Image (cartoon, helix red, strand yellow):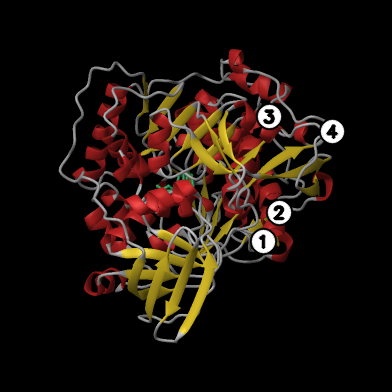
């Protein structure tokens, strides 16, 4: 029987597998980090005592904390630059662009495995790689040459049929898929695209789709590497990286979904979840206050060609603020040369830095109760910096047309203006990329604190429920980001003050005054970001276990990496109920002492996970 593309790549990188636990370990060819998760990842890497990274390529990007309001972020950048230079890592300076956009342009190679300390790392899978998001510690281990272990993924075959109509975009494909699969539908799966519709999508469009596979909770997504990929690599002046790759025709998928591109409608993810999907035609007439175009999902040259085609000769509505963040220096240069920047400026756009910016709450927070249309990938509660804002995730076409009209508008039929050709020169633009010289000494500013040491949690835990939560709690709920909190990413003691602060401002004080605590939640706990701070900071506050009906993949691994026991159970609990947990490698017994209820389950983590929890986390194993 033929193989899926997913398993062609995974099997070519497999170093071992554990059939009993249904896991496989793969060697990682390339890594990427960004600054908000990178400082921890490199502190962890430094603790291994190696003299250089062991990967084919590792790149350290600065794109998240670029707002330098005080010394902290600038100190982090300096630390990252000096570590990169000393240990053999390419450094992408602030201003060079969003990690995933630059990685796609300059470094992603078909057939390779890429591990990144950012959940949207699968953006690079648009060229036919298997790119996976992970916590910083897992990426540090990959840089040290250690294999990365995943649950053997199920492969979902998504057959794309036909071609998109004018005004319908790759973003609509993935939003539509989110409506079908939901934000937990992709956990421990790879979403593999095939069918005659694939060849109608350029690499940037494919990457938009792979990018938001993260919102499905998927391990990765993948497109074949074909003539379209070859052309993309040629215009990026690295044709030599091309190899053709596709699934065998007789392969079978674990799940099958078919999407008819010919009939797909422009759609949106409505507040506050990417899987709250409606067609634009159902939303028309909603007044819009803010429109933002950019982020690692939609900030390619191709996206701005579509935006400029709609904005050409028009002015944005007087009640709308339109912010535009080109994804990279390359994109910025291209829109400057091709007249697109003029069109945007004449329409009334505000040009933002080539960085994550408002996507991670770094500026541009909307007004109270405002409607904000964003071409981004996440509209979780509070992420924009304004809790009452209503954030809709849309395509660049919907965003541009709505900015002109002042209300949500359907771009069906909007064509690309031939003035803005896609057949242009793609400048190499590596002026903010630095190859390592192995000469620097590591510089560590005063805000960069050592990672706290944690003791093992022990097999008999007496604790209290420090918070009880619903389904789909995101890492933005657990460990908020934004301009106020992000500067403390290298300082666990300080950042722990902000755990759950958007939904329960007393959480951290309550934890510290109670000693041991547990978190009780429902389905898909920890969806979203790879930030390991959402595990380390609660652990610092005394959280020993999280009891949830189910977990998101990256977060579950982060909990284990820092010695917190993830228990998959649906239990009844209220705030401050006394919870006892007795566990060993065979079973877990959870007792809600206050409610006099006991729950039992088999121990279902792997031997490796058990080892890490018994040790008090991965860092204690070195
Ligand atoms: C995000 O989009 O939430 C982030 C910020 O890029 C995170 C990483 C982080 O929290 O630093 C991610 O997606 O992993
Ligand atoms: Fe940056 Fe937003 Fe992409 Fe995260 S989702 S990497 S914050 S642009």
Neighbour class for label 4 at 10 Å: few (<14), some, many (≥20)? few
Badge number at residue 8: 3
Q: Nearer the viewer, residue 227 or 529?
A: 529
Q: Earlier in the sequence, mark 1 or mark 2?
A: 2
- Tell me the CA gap for discs 3 and 4: 13 Å
Question: Where the C terminus falls, by quadrant?
Answer: top left
Q: Position of residue 52 (x, y in %)?
A: 32, 22
Q: Is residue 484 visible?
A: yes
In front: mark 2 or mark 3? 3
Task: Tell me the quarter of the picture where residue 418 sits.
Answer: top right
Residue at the farthest top position? 240
The residue that label 1 is drawn on is 277
Q: Is mark 4 within 8 Å of ligand 1?
A: no
SS category of the residue bearing label 1 = strand
The residue that label 4 is drawn on is 250
Q: Earlier in the sequence, mark 3 or mark 4?
A: 3
Q: Is mark 1 within 8 Å of ligand 2?
A: no
- Tell me the CA gap for discs 2 and 3: 27 Å
Q: Is mark 2 within 8 Å of ligand 2?
A: no
Q: Is residue 354 left or right of residue 446?
A: right
The residue that label 2 is drawn on is 176
> What residue do we see at 48% from left, 59% from top?
526
SS category of the residue bearing label 4 = loop
């Amino acid at each position: 029987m033929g193989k899926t593309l997913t398993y062609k790549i995974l099997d070519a990188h497999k170093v071992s597998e554990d059939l009993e636990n249904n896991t496989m370990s793969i060697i990682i060819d390339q890594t990427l980090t960004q600054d908000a998760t990178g400082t921890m990842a490199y502190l962890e890497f430094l603790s291994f005592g190696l003299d250089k990274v062991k990967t084919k390529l590792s790149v350290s990007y600065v794109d998240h904390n670029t707002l330098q309001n005080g010394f902290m972020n600038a100190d982090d950048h300096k630390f990252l630059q000096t570590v990169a230079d000393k240990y053999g890592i390419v450094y992408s300076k602030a201003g060079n662009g969003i990690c995933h956009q630059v990685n796609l342009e300059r470094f992603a190679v078909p057939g390779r495995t890429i591990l990144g300390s950012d959940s949207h790392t699968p953006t690079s899978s648009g060229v036919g790689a298997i790119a996976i998001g992970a916590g910083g510690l897992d990426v540090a281990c990959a840089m040290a040459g250690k294999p990365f272990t995943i649950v053997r993924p199920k492969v979902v075959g998504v057959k794309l049929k036909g071609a998109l109509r004018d005004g319908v975009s790759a973003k609509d494909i993935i939003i539509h898929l989110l409506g079908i699969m939901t934000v937990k539908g992709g956990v421990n799966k790879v979403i593999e695209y095939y069918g005659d519709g694939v060849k109608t999508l350029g690499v940037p469009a494919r990457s938009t789709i792979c990018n938001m596979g993260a919102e499905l909770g998927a391990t990765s997504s993948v497109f074949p590497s074909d003539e379209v990929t070859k052309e993309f690599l040629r215009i990026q002046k690295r044709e030599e990286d091309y190899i053709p790759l596709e699934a065998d025709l007789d392969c079978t998928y674990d799940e099958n979904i078919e999407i008819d591109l010919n009939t797909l409608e422009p759609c949106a993810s409505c507040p506050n979840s990417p899987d709250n999907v409606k067609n634009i035609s159902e939303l028309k007439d909603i007044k819009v206050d803010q429109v933002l175009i950019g982020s690692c999902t939609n900030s390619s040259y191709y996206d701005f060609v579509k935006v400029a085609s709609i904005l050409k000769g028009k002015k944005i509505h007087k009640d709308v603020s339109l912010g535009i963040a080109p994804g990279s220096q390359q994109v910025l240069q291209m829109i400057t040369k091709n007249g697109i920047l003029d069109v945007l400026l004449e329409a009334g756009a505000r040009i933002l830095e080539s960085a994550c910016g408002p996507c991670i709450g770094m500026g541009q927070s909307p007004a109270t109760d405002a409607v904000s249309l964003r071409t981004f990938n996440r509209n979780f509660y509070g992420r924009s910096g304004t809790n009452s804002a209503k954030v809709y995730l849309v395509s660049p076409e919907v965003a541009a047309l709505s900015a002109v009209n002042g209300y949500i508008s359907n771009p069906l039929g909007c064509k690309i203006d031939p003035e803005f050709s896609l057949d242009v020169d793609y400048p190499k633009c590596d002026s903010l990329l630095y190859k390592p010289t192995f000469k620097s000494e590591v510089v560590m500013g005063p805000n960069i604190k050592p990672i706290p040491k944690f003791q093992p949690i022990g097999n008999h835990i007496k604790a209290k429920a420090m918070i009880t939560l619903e389904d789909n709690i995101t890492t933005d709920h657990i460990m908020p980001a934004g301009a106020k909190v992000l500067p403390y990413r290298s300082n666990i003691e300080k950042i722990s003050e902000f755990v759950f602060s958007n939904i329960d401002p007393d959480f951290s004080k309550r934890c510290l005054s109670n000693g041991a605590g547990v978190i009780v939640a429902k389905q898909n706990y920890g969806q979203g970001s790879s930030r390991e701070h959402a595990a380390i900071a609660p652990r610092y506050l005394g959280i020993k276990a999280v009891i949830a009906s189910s977990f998101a993949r990256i977060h579950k691994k982060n909990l284990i990496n820092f010695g917190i026991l993830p228990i998959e159970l649906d239990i009844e609990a209220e705030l401050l109920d006394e919870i006892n947990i007795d566990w060993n490698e065979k079973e877990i017994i959870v007792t809600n002492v206050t409610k006099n209820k006991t729950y039992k389950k088999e121990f279902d983590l792997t031997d490796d996970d058990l080892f890490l929890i018994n040790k008090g986390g991965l860092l204690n194993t070195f």
